[in-house]
Amino acid sequence: MRKGLLLIALFLLAQAQGFAQITLSQSSVGAIGSVYYMGVDEVIDSGTTVGPAGASQAWDFSGLNIDSRDTVRFLDPAATPYASSFPGANLCIQQSSLGAGLAYLVSSSTSLEIIGLAGDPGGLNQIFIIPQSPSLTVAAFPFTYQDSFLDTTEIDLTIDGSAISPFLDSVRYQSIVHRDLLGDAWGDLTLWSGTFNTLRVKEVSTTYDSIWVLTFLGWNLWQDSSYTDSSFTWWDNASGYLLCQADYLGPDFNEIRYQNPNPVAVSPGIFDAAQVYPNPASDRIIIAQPGQDFEVISILDLQGKVLKQAQLSGVRDEININDLPAGLYIYRIFSKDQTHAKTGKLQVIH
């Protein structure tokens, strides 16, 4: 009888470990040098939903499509061209879908905040320095299920109007965003790359945009608009960046972004040219690629959790694996355009 009760208790414990409530902290945010590859599903299947709020939820997004791809890089602000404009920043994020734009952040034990942007949002072939005051709070720490916070951020930018029209002296753009964030659910999120123990954060944001133009008649309000959007974002404590985000424009389901999308096939020639050895390996592996077709290697456990990630910079790169316990792992090396990947098994022995 006792043996039977023990087996039941062990089974219940195993089930509980599959659904464990997590708390986000500063360590949940990736380090400088991290690179994240995102897939974007822009044509949402009719049966796809974000599901209800609450504890012990399960979300299966393993069948998401890839309509486009994106790359997010965590950079050292000091190594970027606009660091002097944001001296307080200790993290910089670059997103390939936004071109040359950079976001400057302050990461601390209590929050992750965007203090400003540098980029060309209007496509005018000119880089603008855009402070955010108050800053935009991406996350408050510690943060767990049923925690919430309100945030207001503002951008107020005046630019030379002649770049838009010879009849304009100046153009002023102001955007005020009120955000309401709530940890509304937790549970297991399944993507193509694995299953993750996550906290879901619901955000409702109301934006007020105004544009004024200065002509020989003086300042005039040219455009004034407001809109309310929402998003659901899944985080865990190990990936360093959002695992998945579902965006709504007003009431309409717009897109889902998610980490480590399923790569498409590549020609055998590219695969054969890239070699990862020795395998088994004890202290390091070597990635040899004469054509330099790949730029990042990720090492994952068998559940799909990314344990190590490194940039590839030449025809021969060495990656230290001393910190990995002995066992079987999966490696993935990604092409420079993030559309292709080579996947294999790696045996670590010590």
Image (cartoon, rainbow, N blue to C red):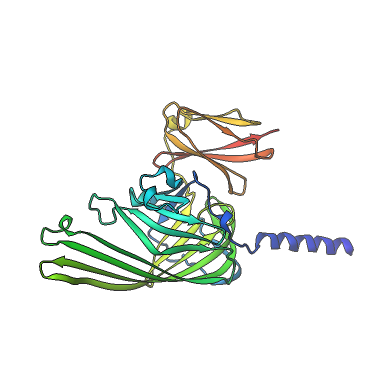
Q: Is residue 154 visible?
A: yes
Give coordinates of residue 87: x percent, y percent: 42, 52
Residue sticking out furthest to the right: 1
Give coordinates of residue 125: x percent, y percent: 23, 49
Location of residue 217 with respect to 97 vertically, above or below: below
Q: In the shown orientation, is residue 130 left or right of residue 316?
A: left
Residue, x 45% and y 54% (percent of image)?
Answer: 88
Q: Quadrant of residue 132?
A: bottom left
Q: In the shown orientation, is residue 71 left or right of residue 122?
A: right
Q: How many numbered discs?
A: 0
Residue, x 10% and y 67% (percent of image)?
Answer: 216
Residue, x 62% and y 62% (percent of image)?
Answer: 22
Give coordinates of residue 179: x percent, y percent: 43, 70
Give coordinates of residue 250: x percent, y percent: 37, 72
Location of residue 235 with respect to 224 vertically, above or below: above
Q: Quadrant of residue 248?
A: bottom left
Q: Quadrant of the N terminus?
A: bottom right
Q: In the shown orientation, is residue 310 left or right of residue 204?
A: right
Q: Quadrant of residue 290?
A: top left
292 or 345: nearer the viewer: 292
Q: Quadrant of the C terminus?
A: top right
89 or 204: nearer the viewer: 89
Q: Is residue 65 visible?
A: no
349 or 167: nearer the viewer: 167
